[in-house]
Amino acid sequence: MKVTLHVWRQPNAQTKGKMVTYESPQITGDMSFLEMLDVLNETLTMKGEDPIAFDHDCREGICGTCSLMINGIAHGPEKAITTCQLYMRSFKDGDHIYVEPWRAKAFPVIKDLVVDRSAFDRIMAAGGFISVNAGGAPDANAIPIPKDDAELAMDAAACIGCGACVASCKNASAMLFVAAKVSHMAHLPQGHPERNRRVIRMVDQMDDEGFGNCTNQYECEAVCPKGISVSFIAKMNREYIRASLVA
Amino acid sequence: MKLEAKIPSGPLEKKWANHKFESKLVNPANKHKFEVIMVGTGLAGGSAAASLAELGYKVKAFCFQDSPRRAHSIAAQGGINAAKNYQNDGDSVYRLFYDTIKGGDFRAREANVYRLAEVSANIIDQCVAMGVPFAREYGGQLANRSFGGAQVSRTFYARGQTGQQLLLGCYAALSRQVGLGNVNMIPRTEMLDLVVIDGVARGIITRSLVTGKIEAHVADAVVLATGGYSNVFFLSTNAMGCNTTAIWRAYKRGAAFANPCYTQIHPTCIPVSGDYQSKLTLMSESLRNDGRIWAPKKKGANRAPQDIPEDERDYYLERKYPSFGNLAPRDISSRAAKEACDDGRGVGESKRGVYLDFADTIKRLGENVIRERYGNLFDMYHEITGENPYKAPMRIYPAPHYTMGGLWVDYNLMSNIPGLFVIGEANFSDHGANRLGASALMQGLADGYFVLPYTIGHYFASVKPKKLSTDRAEFKQAEQDVTARIKKLLDLKGKRTVDSYHRELGLKMWERCGMARNEAGLKKNLQVIPTLYEQYWKDVAVLGNNEEFNTSLEKALRVADFFELAELMCHDALDRNESCGGHFREEYQTSEGEALRDDKNYCYVSAWEYQGEGKKPVQHKEALYFEFVHLAERSYK
């Protein structure tokens, strides 16, 4: 099969970008979307044209590096997967596919489809941790944790930090990302000593980075490759209010 | 070159404790005066960077990813081993030590492996304290599962995402230190050379992957935590960016490369399909707790698996290794799959595949239990193949996954170049000729949290490195070398893409230096690979320029190093006239087709020293002594 691609090309952050149209080479449904881009890039290179830059690494849906807006949907048309897990069998021969980077003020474009998500790292550095130095931890079974709490913490901890939540939100809000980390740690006894400090600092940093607020449209949950629930945003809001009252 | 392993004397279980006591200390008030460069921030580098910063050292850390949270450690699925004996099933530090030595086919140092087993329990404690959400039982205690090469349940896990949760744990610790200003974290930056001054590692040259800026960095010690080199095969389970460049550049500056031919081919990956595939996906070894591996007994059968009656199925692992069954170690399971396919009994379109079947367990425990244990893996399989593994068995085939070889290090994890430390998969130290499942995460964190923080302090306290600046001629020279190399690639304006060269190299390595090797094939590779490499430097197409985000240039630099490494791997495989662990030389096998070790002649670590372009490297041998474990034929029957 063959498809027509409309791809965002932008040489660097300083230059304005535009959509450029490419005819895909002959492809099969068993190729992944990124493998299709690989093949296109091989053809472009042979023609002496600059290959399309896109972020990717593990290609198995866990590292959170890949980040494409495909036909207006973060990570493409299938539910609960990352771009690298999308296969061409999800498209038909002759389809037009629009490929764009994550768009958000806090995620400036580096080149083409590659954006800078270091804002997420700064939010983490502000409070996304439990302060415990290596050595001196008590026996791992010393504090029993109810299975349900552990499972809930794990549901939240499954976030891969890809930024699809931000890209899909009309406010470019990072609430789902921040809520996932806050909830993961708030559901575990180990996270309790710092819970107030943590949520305040992370939310402050999130605001400073220029992410918008949540207006309960739940676009983020719909595109999240790990199916992180928006109920964690409610949890974060409760944590935040609680922390504000204590402080 | 002198290889001194510096293994402490005394009884096995006292070595590490005594060594720690005898190590010199750096006064807490002086620690901030020492600066460490950390290259790579996965499990080993991330945990080391965080721990060193917690102690008070100044750390400058680099990774090529856009964030340390994305290092390939994140992809580890099944679990992490620890000798906790929470299951009361007879586990102990000594048993984990013994299983690891035996699993590695008696080609690792006893003292290193014992230390690894010893600190394994601390890792779990540390991770739980940091909020890693391990799987738990209803009583609130930690849950365990079993992995290959062990008859106890000692593997801790977080669904099928154990690597992710452990990495996010050490990323959190690292982030805390970044926030405190103790770690200067520099992402999207790659190390392109090591700077050695007066025989001591003192810095690195880096290239920013965003701006192309070449920069020199000086420090009192350099730590490489840059992972393995399975991508030499092009198709592997490694992430696309994993590369050998950092350790290869260190090798070319004088660091010994140990056992490069020890590569691990993981038995349960999704088979190759089509010519454009960019990587292979692993299906966790944990699946072998509940899945049964089989191939049809008849050759060339094209029947659907459900149509093959029970008595026409060959559960070959259960047949050949009744006591370990489907949990035989990786090297053995991989070879057995290859044998079945070579015998014409492979399944799937390519006929390079066998079945991993859950029907019996689903019948016994119900689909829900399987979904809870492995749901995300089953989903992953479904997305890639379009098949439903709850209904039909998975098709699997071995794929390159991990490299036991790496830079040579002593007991302190320091290479033969003083001041250059190597941790995690990048070193050669703990897994011998074959790594057991769930031991990579254990080693990465052991090195980073519990070994390096002690040994690097001893180095600083005894050596007291002098302060230097990047104005030194050695830095300028290394910078010029890097710049010249980049310019040469960009000036080639060749006709063939980097990927097409990489694919061809990978295929040659897979065919002749992969799961099975022989003298003729290795000699052939030593002829054809240098020829192809020569062509590469004349004809590779690298577009654009250095001062930009340039993925072809990034790849071109990495693939050049893979070419050189490939040659060294073949030399090493050719030298080792025995079969051991992941290194299977067809000439050396028992009548039953098992690996035939030669302890009399090959009980050594093979460490290679670079001699200059176009010259054959020189081999040095570190003899392995087994004082506590009896050298025996590895049997899993």
Image: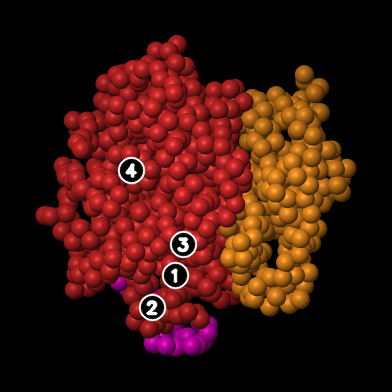
Chain colours: A orange, B red
Front: mark 1 or 4:
4
Mark 2–mark 4 Cα distance, whole angstroms, equals 38 Å
> Which is nearer the N-term, disc 1 or disc 3?
1
- Residue type pointed to by label 3: Asp
- Residue type pointed to by label 4: Tyr
- Residue type pointed to by label 2: Cys
The residue identified by callout 4 is B251
Q: Are marks 2 and 4 in contact (CB under 8 Å)?
A: no
- Badge 2 local density, few (<14 within 10 Å), some, or many (20+)? many
Kindly identify which chain the residue marked by label 1 belongs to.
B
Tell me where the magenta segment starts and ends, as one range: B298-326
As displayed, is residue B211 above or below residue B581? above
The residue identified by callout 2 is B341
Residue B303 part of the magenta segment:
yes
> Which is nearer the N-term, disc 2 or disc 1?
2
| Quarter of the image where the N terminus of chain B is located | top left
> Which is nearer the N-term, disc 2 or disc 3?
2
Circle 3 — which element? helix
Percent of width and height locating residue B361 = 51, 68
Residue placed most toward the observer, B382 or B69: B69
Residue B130 part of the magenta segment:
no
| Residue A239 visible, this angle | no
Residue placed most toward the observer, B176 or B585: B585
